[in-house]
Image: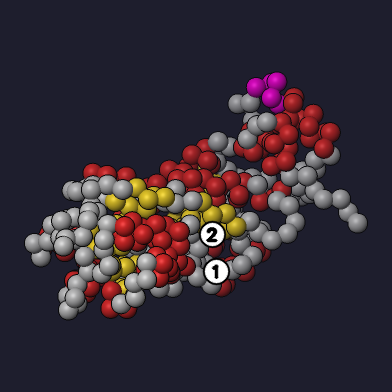
Amino acid sequence: MPSRRVTIAEIAASAGVSVPTVSKVLNGRADVSETTRKRVQQIMVDRGYQRRAAGAQRPVGLIDMVVPGLDSPWVVDVLRGAESEARKVGSQIVLTSAEGAPAGDRRWLDRLASRRSDGLVLVVSEAAPEAVEQLRALHTPVVLLDPVGGSDPSFPTVGATNWAGGLSAVEHLVSLGHRRIAALSGPPQLACSQERVEGYRAALGRADIAVDERLVRFTEFTTSGGLAGARAVLDAPDPPTAIFAGSDMQAFGVFHEAAARGLRIPEDLSVVGFDDVTFSALATPPLTTVRQPLTRMAAEAVRILLDADDASPGPPPRVELATHLVVRGSTGPVRR
């Protein structure tokens, strides 16, 4: 039975350095101290590390990232994390906006094949079936960041604790005395949309509060989606006193709709978002939200790509980073 191949992650752990540092040593980069280089090289010899097979393609220094669109501030946080991790090994990010369509039309695949790529990060996007086959033929590693429902199980994934985030958001509202709580979320085909709503349902169940399905709406993770969702639930015969929005952008849409109706936040309506984008703390009032570690998630996705050729045999990694509630001024006790 052949021995298991030693990975660069194991070399890095033994040397007390990062995976990108080991990659730099392997690629002959100059920005590594001579002492570190010798230590890493000696550990490679001692552990019997073997580089990729002869004839395998060398890295080209390009990592592709496909995002669903460019109209949301959370994309900036994702790009910041991806670019920071790629820069550690001298790579660059190539950005493509899918504009809501499955990634991988023929022209895009042809460009990818002609210039090559060291890997692809799909951010809340899915690849067209023909694109998946072409990517495998090109030996292009793929990592899913915040994957959609029904994604290819052979791809590594990086996500956040969406269910736990939804649970903490609604438990916070319940602790303030709210019992009529609405939930807005994104497109229902997205796993994160469903998971956040399931966390909402679980929190209500723990509080022995029945779910009113009229107060659950799936729209888009946008300001306009939040406006539409808020309008629908606030028009209910018995409107909610609090709204859990599945994204900060939806929460800002709720803010606009509340203002149009003369509702004060949080005196008349409490609002919780999800993501903690940069300007959530600058809203009026500052938005209570579930912080999703977007920058760390993107960095982890890129790190997995960089280590793809040295990954241990077995199931692809499934990484889930913790969310936590950030309480600010948009939530308050229910009016009696």
Between 104 and 200, the residue placed more toward the observer is: 200
x, y percent for residue 151: 55, 69
- Label 2–label 1 contact, CB within 8 A: yes
Q: What's the amino acid at mark 2?
A: Leu
Report the residue at 8% width, 62% height from top.
Answer: 262
- 208 versus 329 height, above or below: below
Residue 21, placed above or below residue 122:
above
SS category of the residue bearing label 1: loop
Look at 23% across and 44% down and name the residue there: 282
- Name the residue: 78% across, 44% down: 6
Q: Which residues are magenta?
A: 33-37
Residue at 16 percent of width and 62 percent of height: 336
Q: Could you tell me residue 287's position as x and y percent?
A: 26, 50
Mark on residue 144? Answer: 2
User: Marks 2/1: CA distance?
Assistant: 8 Å
Question: Which residue extends farthest right?
Answer: 1
The main secondary structure of the magenta stretch is helix
Q: Quadrant of residue 137?
A: bottom right
Q: Specify whether residue 32 is painted magenta.
A: no
Q: Disc count in the image?
A: 2
- The answer to whether any part of residue 291 appears in the image is yes
